Image (cartoon, rainbow, N blue to C red):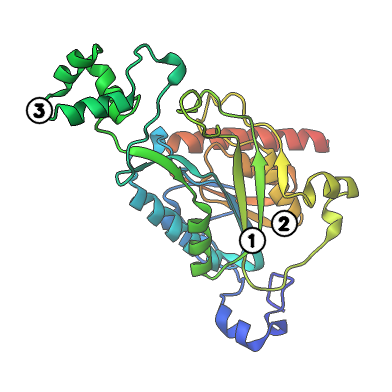
Amino acid sequence: MTEGTRHNPARLPRELQRKLAVTVVGAPRPGDLAPGQVHRGDARALLPRVTPGSVALAVWSPPYFVGKDYEAHLTFEDWQSLLRNTIALHFDVIRPGGFLAINVADILCFKDPSMPRVQAEAAARRRSRVTRDDVLRAASSHPALNRYQLAALLGCSEQTIDRRLNGNNIRGGKYESQTRVKIVGGLIEDWALGAGFFTYDRRVWVKDPAWENSRWSSLSYRAVDEFEYLYVFWKPGITAVDRRRLTAQEWKEWGSRGVWHFPSVRANRDHESKFPLELPRRAIRLLTDPGDLVLDCFLGSGTTAVAALGEGRRFIGIEISQRSCELARRRIAAAQSAGRKQRR
């Protein structure tokens, strides 16, 4: 039996034992990150300081590459490298039979220089009866004319010529790459599989529709942003399955359901990418036992740590932003204080 755990690697097939080659849980090494604290720094620098095999569940939400201020410095290649390396570093710290759960969304405005310009035309708003076909016929019949001369010939403005040929939004973005939807689930899975994990589960979180953040709801047929994913990856090993973790009603309502319904954080006044407490809370309830260690290496405002404390679990938080670290520590202190009052 591995010291400090309930897992017995000797029960695994020999081939799998050789493949795993995991470092078993032992006493924390000098310099290892202490549980119950928020540690400031880059996840890639601090994850090697988490005691190997000590984490029952890592649950986190990375930067989504959607243009937030805190990720504005990242190129898409930087973003991929960040997630790929972060996922790989989790394999040693998660115990055999433990889980890595990643909350992420597809990139709905992914700039693609190779994409042709979308010929979006707001027919209901059209002020000129000149059509794109009219412009193309005139240009074919009079190849020497520039767009100003074509406009005079057709009795419209030069802007109308541009819009008919290049799309409705050409005046505001003629030098910008077009955007498309980028599906990220395949990337996340490839990186997890490459690290040694196996895809265990996936859930869909249906949140509030983000009408105000939609860039195309009035000039396309695309859907607004109203759902995200929770991808769950398993580290090979003995996994204790205890159906008593949830009540029969909880299993019926969400434990066995692939789609989760609960609202977004309505007012992100203190942190621009705060996710609701219910998201990590459900993952923690489902995949861990009281006293287990939960890790969040993109801790942000501290929601995962607060959820872990509320469910009687320990936590390690890693966060690169000093401001977010201070916010997380305040929220954690408030949660600990509330917990002490309830126990009195």
Q: Mark 1 Cα within 10 Å, few/some/many (few <14, many 20+)?
A: many
Q: Quadrant of the N terminus?
A: bottom right
- The furthest residue to the right: 248
Marks 3/1: CA–CA distance: 66 Å
Q: Is residue 97 above or below residue 21?
A: above
Q: Which residue is mark 2?
A: 287
Q: Position of residue 122 (x, y in %)?
A: 43, 21
Q: Position of residue 307 (x, y in %)?
A: 68, 42
157 left or right of 315 in image = left
Residue type marked 1: Phe
Which mark, residue 222?
A: none
285 left or right of 20 in image = right
Q: Earlier in the sequence, mark 3 or mark 1?
A: 1
Give the residue drawn at x 60%, y 47%: 229
Q: Which residue is mark 1?
A: 99
Q: Which residue is mark 3?
A: 144
**Which of label 3 and label 1 is nearer to you?**
3
Q: Is residue 79 visible?
A: yes
- The furthest residue to the front: 141
SS class of the residue under badge 1?
Answer: strand
Contact (Cβ within 8 Å) of mark 1 with mark 2: yes
